[in-house]
Image (cartoon, rainbow, N blue to C red):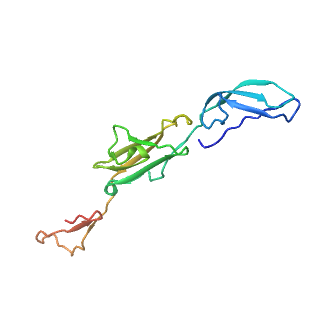
Amino acid sequence: STNVLKVDAVTVPAGLNVVLTYDGLTNRPTSAGSFTVIGAINEANYEGSATNTFLVNKASQVITIAPMTNSIPLKDLTNVVVSASSDSGLPVSLSLDTNSVAVLSGATNNGSGVLNNIQQTGNVYLRASQAGNGNYQAASDAALTINVVKLNQSITFNTLPAQVYTNAPFTLSASASSGGRW
């Protein structure tokens, strides 16, 4: 983190100069951890010191999967871009559960990927994770289920001429909203 954490020292009498060290260093901590802090009075007429422990806890983080519809028609699924991010700025890993009807490809360790090879209806189970580091706790996984569905289609018959029971067989022709013709 770029946040500089500060310890304040209070003296009696008030206002005395105090030199603080953190594990023996004068630089203040910029990361999580446990630090031994020593405050030593730096005055000509006063002396004294105190020691304490300064604990900097890891920060929490939250993963967000970029919004997308939870139901996608099979015909529209050739390459679907998916992405996720963490509010910590750390890279997020994407994965699919084993019973997903898609394959995840691309740079899946930087929070983005592409769902492809979707050839059947069913569910795609996307999972985003971030393991944490020295300053951030592991995030709770984020999950998204996408239902891959078949579209309803309509079939339209061309106009039929009037027929009489005794007429010879005739040809029907029709077209489907999916583009098929018969």
> 158 or 112, which is in the foreground?
112
Q: Is residue 75 above or below residue 169?
A: above
> Can residue 72 be seen here?
yes
- Which residue lies most toward the left here? 168
Tell me residue 58's x, y (percent): 59, 34
Tell me the quadrant of the picture where the C terminus can be found. Answer: bottom left
User: Measuring 85% from the left and 27% from the top, which residue is drawn there?
Assistant: 46
- Describe residue 13's horizontal placement relative to residue 97 as left or right: right
Q: Residue at point 66% right, 41% down? A: 4
Q: Quadrant of residue 7?
A: top right
| Residue 128 picture location, percent across and down | 45, 41
Q: Residue at x 45, y 53 (%)?
A: 68
Farthest-out residue, right: 13
Query: Could you tell me if residue 151 is visible in this image?
Result: no
Q: Is residue 140 above or below residue 83?
A: above
State whether residue 34 is above or below residue 4. above
Work out whether residue 44 or residue 119 is closer to the camera in this orientation and state it.
Answer: 44
Q: From this viewpoint, which residue is outermost toward the bottom? A: 161
Q: Is residue 156 left or right of residue 53?
A: left
Picture coordinates of residue 98, whole percent (x, y): 34, 37
Which quadrant does the N terminus fall into? top right
Is residue 69 or residue 60 the one in the foreground?
60
Q: Position of residue 173 (x, y in %)?
A: 20, 68
Place residue 50 in its image quadrant.
Answer: top right
Where on the picture, by quarter, is residue 77? bottom left
